[in-house]
Amino acid sequence: MSNVEDALKVFDEMLQRRPLPSVVHFNQILTQFVKLKHYPIVLSLNSQMLLSGIRPDHYTLAIVINCYCRLNRMDYALSVLAYFFKLGLQPDVATFNTLMNGFVLQNRVADAARPFSKMVVGGHCQPNVIAFNTLIKGFCMIGNNTTAVQLLGKMEENGCEPDIVTYSNIIDSLCKDTLVDEAKNFFSEMVGRGIVPNVITYTSLIQGVCNIGRWKEAWRLLNEMASQGIFPDVFTFSILVDALCKEGKVAQAKTVIQIMIQRGIEPNTITYNSLMDGYCLRGEMDKANQVFDLMLSKGFSVNFIAVA
């Protein structure tokens, strides 16, 4: 039998026992299903528990809220939160974070801010770095850099230390809005705090400088990464290739691809599509067709709009 069938069998056996096992044991079963991402099953089992008179604890309700968030049923998740308070239970910061993340994933950032305010104003619990990062990510996603930066300031006021995720979200958002110099200021601030940048941070900056045509800076950042032992990944290189091709610098883009291959990084669909687009823009259709054939031989999907 599969793990799911085994777990369901154990759950059914537990429901038949008298006296009923503690809710803690049922929570352990629910947790296993959550790990397997069987969220509807968790909700069904929770309903059976309630019908059998098993009183949920704060951990049970946190599991249920998580499942509703994963299923994009935020209305039900909020109902469970209300039930939390009705039972006189205290949600912890992880539960609030789960709710916030559920709203952020749906771009409902204003709704995500409400559980955050409930934590701060209601005094239920103190927001941690994950709570701040979740909300900062949300505001960055909708392009509200001002509020994201204000939240960074509030972190410090609350004695909550920002981390690489905090800064990477803000830097990425600023770069997407072509506010590269502001992004670089936050990068310097981050390094000054002793927070080591990672490939994601550098990739955002490289994307930012490429978007505004500051090629020398892109190469400098690439070399800076290497000097610090931070190796560019396929996404970093693909950004460079795409930006160079859009500027008609196909020879340089091809050099980047050669560097990728030398470092053991296999170019992906985006890389090759960008190179093919670059040749098409220059009217070098024979070379574009060569890239096209290479992609087909590697089993990659092709941007047929560009080919046409």
Image: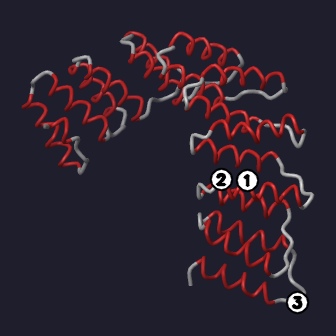
Write the residue at 85% across / 76% down.
54
Q: Quadrant of residue 49?
A: bottom right
As helix, strand or loop, the secondary structure at mark 1 comes to helix
Callout 2 secondary element: helix
Contact check, label 2 and label 1, Cβ < 8 Å: yes
Distance between the alpha carbons at the discs numbered 2 and 1: 6 Å
What residue appears at the point 84 percent right and 51 percent down from the top-left corner? 91
Q: Which one is earlier in the sequence, the residue at label 1 or at label 3?
A: 3
Does 40 sit left or right of 288 as displayed? right
Q: Specify the amino acid type for callout 1.
A: Leu
Horizontal side of 89 relative to 243 (left or right) equals right
Which residue position holds label 2? 74
What amino acid is labelled 3 in the image? Arg
Question: Quadrant of the image for the N terminus?
Answer: bottom right
Residue located beneath label 1 in the image: 78
Residue 203 falls left or right of residue 21: left
Distance from disc 1 to disc 3, alpha carbons, whole Å, reads 33 Å
Return the x and y of residue 134 as percentages of the image width and height.
67, 37
Q: Position of residue 97 (x, y in %)?
A: 73, 45
Label at residue 18: 3
Question: Which mark is nearer the camera, 2 or 3?
Answer: 2
